[in-house]
Structure formats: structure tokens, C-alpha cells
């Protein structure tokens, strides 16, 4: 049962990130090929970086055309229905939040299956969750989401850290994944709904003469 | 004969993309080392991404210094003669078009030699063709070419798709490559000469009450 | 003795580049997770690219949590003490200069240990030295350092070329590394202190009728 749950969440993550890529393409008024390319890059970018770094080659989507079929289908769908959606940017942010939480948990899971140290698994989960969105924003010359004030990367770190911690405590693995995704999504949702943020660095005047 | 045709087209693609990198360096008034770095990154960037994704490591230029010799020679040449060229930006666009078509066909070819599914080969060909230019534009903080109105990525998709389709139909392989490159270049040339573009996504007011 | 010298210089390079990432995070007023992510990406980015290109997988930091521990500790330290520093940008530039020289030499060394051709080792050293900073600037939407007027990439090329040349001349290896780092740092320091630059490309009017 776990295997199919993981596979379903994985495809869901690819689909929602692909949708954010296509919605960004709609903001930039690209043609349908631009939609398809941005959907593919955003949907599979994070997992691709993870696979490269741990040496899991060829990367996951090269042998399984289903992933590209999903991102392309999502791109075509968004191209034809996006104009019916009232607030595309709001939808983009919420889908991105879901993808962020899913990929942070799934990325940490795959990293642990490759027996990397805990701190490395947390970073790999975070990178899996954020790299697709980073590529999307770079390719479209948008302000990178990681520079935004509200909690973003932190939600991915939380999801990955929850997964790694519960896994080390030998909790049954399918609950672990759901708990990790729920924690990451809840934090990002709070940030989106309430404008929640961590204290940021603020420059203060240097103290020339300590007391 | 095919092997030498492929090798010649491959070096031609590297050289013309290297020239676009060096021409971009001239627009940014860099020094000769900046010319050489941008020529190298643009010339070998696309094939490098392709090799990473399919796990063909070390990547192609690591064992063959000829590639870097070509990009460096092109950079030095452009540094000293670019001021004689009347319209450097126009030349950059046309060389980029040629490199785009060459690398889309060659990238799809190498992907198929690694026995990836057809849709994956089309994406890998497209990435091989576009990634060098994407890196060039990112490094120079130029507006990414893929955001431009005229057909660009689509020409790479066409070249890669023509290669994959004819290959599946078991057409003799050297004609396939030439046909793919010709198709991609012709489409991009039309786009450049006539301002050809696909219909883009246009936001329309939502229809609250369908008829 | 060489092994521990190399290991120490390697960690020093990671730490100083991590500090430049954290200082950039302070300029962007990010939260502490943003500091940690930028410190990690800047500190390990260059070596990661080098390892990917030569197929040394998984990349170096995946099996050794010490690297991420160092970048995270540096990030936390900078978050709490950066406001005491009078000129953070000046400090950033000098730490970046040190990291640049260290990673150019170390990158060339690892490339040669993998028996790549000399010109390839110079490029790999240069990429190791510059890619972390490129990622830092891209993620923060800063003007890329490689577009700056003063000598930058050239200092990395010099350090890598000195390493490769002395290694080919069979000079004892620990002196080679120190000489390469010293040469690269000295050139970049001159550039920073004196505003030294190479002659840049300057567009001149075309000559319609050669004499």
C-alpha cells in the first residue's frame, strides 16, 4: 500500500508544480510550447537535482514517460482554462505550497533510502522542494520566491526534518510521509493566510565602544 | 561517413553557440577572459545538461580538449573582429538559430542511442538546444530568449520531433539528422524573418454565466 | 601532511564562501533559514558542479555531514554578529577573493587527480571557484560578479593554470597548491585594491573601406 501511496503523492507533486509553471507562463503570455516547457521544468526540476546529487542516474523521468505526459497534459489544460480562474496568482501560491510540502517529504525519503546522513537528507529534501520553483522564477525573470518575506524555505525544512526525525525513531513509514507533508503544508499555509514570517536580519548601527 | 558528418555538425554547433556567447560578451564589454568563459558555457552548456541527465559521465568535453579549444579560439576571434561586423545582434540571432536546430537534432540522436522513450528524447533534444543560450542569458542578466514572442523553443521541439519520428520509421540515419536540422532551422528562420509566432495565452474576462 | 593541508584549505574555502552567502542574505534581510540555505549553496555549489561534471557521485558533501555543519554554523554566526561589522560588503568581497583562489587551486587539483586534459582542468578549477558565487548572485537577483569590471574570473583562471603548469612540471604537490592559491589571491587582491582590470572589448565604428 505504501508503494502506491508514494507513487500517487509523487505524481500529485509533479502535477501541482507543473500547474504553477503553466500559471507563470500565463502571467508571461507565452505560447503553448512555452507552457509545456515551464510545466516540465517546474514539475521535474527538484527531483532532477536530487537525483543528480546522489548519483541516481539516469534521473527519474528519463525512463518513465508518464512524468512528461502528466506535465504536458497539465500545461495544455491550464492554457485553455486559466482565463476562467479568478485569481491565478493566489492559486499558483497555494499549489506551490502543496508541491513544496510533498516534495520536501518525498525528497527526504529518497535521500534516506540512499543512506545519506540526517542533515544531508534534510538539505536534499529542501532542495527537491524548492529547485523546481527556483528554475521557474529564473527562466521567467520573476523575483525568486525564496527572497519573499513570508515563511517559504522554512516550511520545506520542517517537512524534511519531520520525515527524517520520525524515520530515525522507527515510526511506520507511510504515516511518516503524511505527517511530514501535513506539517510542511500547514506551516506554509499559515504563512500565506496570516503573513507569518520568521524574524529577519535587520542591520543595526555598529557599536564602536562596547560598554 | 555518418560518424564524420555527426562529428562535424557537432563541432559546428559548439562553434556557433560559442560565437553567440562571445557576441553577448561584446555587448556587455567584458574582457577576453569573460569572452572565453561565456563562449565555453554557451557552446558546451546544452550537451552538458543532456549528458548529466542521462548519466553519460564524465560529460562529453571532459575527455576531449578539442571542444574547449574550439570555444576559446572562437572567443579570441570574436574579441578581435566583432567591431568590424555591422549588426552584431542580428548575427547573434542567426547563429543562435543554427545552433538551436543542430543541437536539437543531435541531442535527440544521442538520447535515442541511450534508448530513452520518444517523448523523453524530444525533451532532451530541446534542452540540449536551449540550455546553452539560457545559461548565456542568465550569466549576462539578459532577458531570456525563451520569453520572446517569436517562435524559439518550438523550433527546437520541431527538430527533435522530426528526428525521433523519422528514426522510429527506420529512415536511414544521416538523412534523418539533416532533415531534422533543416526543419528546425527553417522554422526559426521564418520566425526571425517574418516575426512568426504561435498564438499566445491572453487573459480574458472570466465568464460567470456560460450561455 | 599534504592530505591534512588540503582538507584544511578545503574547509576554509567552504567556510569563507558560506560567509559570503550569509553576508548576501544580510543585505537582502532574509531570516535565519535563508541565511543557512544561501551559505550552503554558496559554500558547496562550486565543488558540486565539478563533481557532477567529472562523474564523481554522489557529490562530495552527501557522504560527509561536516560540510553542511560548517556552512550552517557560519550562517548562524553571521546572522548574530554581522551588524557589528562596519563594512559588510567590503568583507564579502575579500572573503570571496580568498574562496575564489582556494577553490580554483583545489578544483584543478581534483580534476587532475581524475586525469583530465590540462585545458579541461583549468576550466574545471575556474568553474569550481566561480559557480558558488554565481548561484548566490542568481538566487538573490544581484548583478553577477562576473560582469564586474575588475579582474575576477581571470584570477581563478590564473590560480588553476599555475596549479596545472607546476603539476605538469612535477613540482612537489603541496607547494604547488599554495603557490596557485597565492597567485590567484594576489591578482584578485590587486584588482580589489587598485581597481585593476584587463582591457575590455570596446565597440569601434566599422571600417567600410580598408586602406
Image: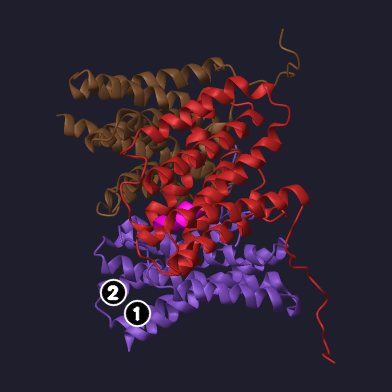
Chain colours: A purple, B red, C brown
Distance from Cα at disc 2 to Cα at disc 1 = 7 Å
Rendered position, A110 above or below C58: below
Chain part drawn in magenta:
B105-110
Residue C75 visible here: no
Query: Does the magenta portion include B177?
Result: no
Q: Secondary structure at mark 2?
A: helix
Above/below status of B70 relative to C193 = below
Type of secondary structure dominating the magenta stretch = helix
> At 41% from the left edge and 18% from the top edge, which residue is drawn?
C186
Mark toward the start of the polypeptide (2 vs 1): 2
Q: Is there a contact, CB below 8 Å, between mark 2 and mark 1?
A: yes
- Given the current orientation, which residue lies at the most extreme left position? C1
How many numbered markers are drawn? 2
In the rendered structure, the answer to whether residue C115 lies left or right of residue A186 reads: left
User: On the image, numbered disc 2 is attached to which residue?
Assistant: A167
In this view, the residue in front, C19 or B53, is B53
Give the structural element (helix, strand or loop) at label 1: helix
User: Residue under circle 1?
Assistant: A176
Q: Residue furthest bottom?
A: B211
Amino acid at each position: 500500500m505504501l508503494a502506491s501511496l508514494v507513487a500517487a503523492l509523487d505524481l500529485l507533486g509533479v502535477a501541482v508544480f507543473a500547474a504553477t509553471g503553466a500559471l507563470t507562463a500565463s502571467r508571461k503570455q507565452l505560447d503553448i510550447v512555452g507552457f509545456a516547457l515551464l510545466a516540465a521544468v517546474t514539475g521535474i526540476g527538484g527531483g532532477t537535482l536530487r537525483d543528480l546529487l546522489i548519483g541516481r542516474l539516469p534521473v527519474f523521468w528519463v525512463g518513465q514517460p508518464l512524468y512528461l505526459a502528466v506535465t504536458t497534459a497539465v500545461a495544455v489544460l491550464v492554457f485553455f482554462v486559466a482565463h476562467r480562474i479568478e485569481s491565478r496568482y493566489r492559486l499558483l501560491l497555494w499549489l506551490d505550497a502543496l508541491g513544496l510540502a510533498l516534495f520536501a517529504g518525498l525528497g527526504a525519503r529518497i535521500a534516506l533510502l540512499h543512506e545519506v546522513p540526517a542533515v544531508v537528507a534534510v538539505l536534499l529534501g529542501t532542495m527537491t522542494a524548492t529547485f523546481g520553483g527556483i528554475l521557474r522564477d529564473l527562466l521567467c525573470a520573476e523575483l525568486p520566491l525564496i527572497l519573499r518575506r513570508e515563511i517559504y524555505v522554512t516550511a520545506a525544512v520542517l517537512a524534511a526534518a519531520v520525515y527524517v526525525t520520525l524515520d530515525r525513531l522507527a515510526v511506520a513509514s507511510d504515516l511518516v510521509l503524511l505527517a511530514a507533508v501535513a506539517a510542511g503544508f500547514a506551516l506554509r499555509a499559515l504563512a500565506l493566510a496570516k503573513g507569518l514570517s520568521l524574524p529577519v536580519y535587520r542591520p543595526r548601527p555598529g557599536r564602536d565602544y562596547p560598554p
